[in-house]
Amino acid sequence: MTDNLFDVCSADQLQEQLPEGTVLAFDFGKKRIGVAMGNTMLRNARPLVTIDNEVTMRCFMAIAELIATWQPVLFVVGLPLHRDGTAHELTRLSHRFARRLAVRFNIKVILKDERYTSETASVMLRELGVTGRKQKDFLDQMAAQQILQSFFDEQYAITRR
């Protein structure tokens, strides 16, 4: 990792081991932000909470509370892309959100490709019997879990080489 707090890279581009501790992952959306947490030692992600993102100040207050509780050493923010890998409007907004996290909380942020995470989360919820409107409460945090687990899995594969 470089000294700067904001990197757009995949796990295979990281130059050193992950710091030991908790990681918070975010599935950014205009209305809601799903949050998941995991530990770099266990490399296991779990859904945590969904934050309302319609009022920016309240959103960052909720994130500050999560930081106080979990003391993360790293953030992973999902990077939304079209299926062909090109950027769209949420790509820019996710970059902005990631920069704000880095500056406001002085914690390193890694952007992680999040293609298909919402679809995977939706399938997982259906398999658990959560369907239709009931998914709304859990979908974003489950997508954040998918983002973080994918990041951990990539990082583990790289360090095992």
Image (tube, rainbow, N blue to C red):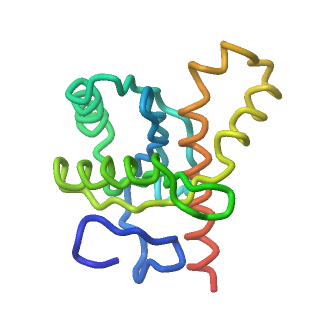
Which image quarter is the C terminus in? bottom right
What is the residue that sits farthest to the top in this orientation? 133
Residue at x-position 59% and y-position 79%: 158
- Image coordinates for residue 154, horizontal then vertical, percent: 61, 68
Residue at x-position 39% and y-position 53%: 92
Of residue 15 and residue 160, the one placed in the foreground of this image is: 15
What is the residue that sits farthest to the bottom in this orientation? 161
Which image quarter is the N terminus in? bottom left
Q: Is residue 97 left or right of residue 18?
A: left
- Image coordinates for residue 129, horizontal then vertical, percent: 80, 19
* Number of marks: 0
- Image coordinates for residue 118, horizontal then vertical, percent: 65, 40
The relative height of residue 111 versus residue 159 in the rendered view (above or below) is above
Residue at x-position 83% and y-position 28%: 127
The relative height of residue 4 versus residue 20 in the rendered view (above or below) is below
Q: Is residue 41 left or right of residue 124?
A: left
Of residue 74 and residue 7, the one placed in the foreground of this image is: 7
Q: Is residue 80 left or right of residue 100?
A: right
The relative height of residue 68 versus residue 43 in the rendered view (above or below) is above
The relative height of residue 161 versus residue 109 in the rendered view (above or below) is below
- Image coordinates for residue 63, horizontal then vertical, percent: 29, 34
Of residue 115 and residue 91, the one placed in the foreground of this image is: 91
Residue at x-position 22% and y-position 76%: 3
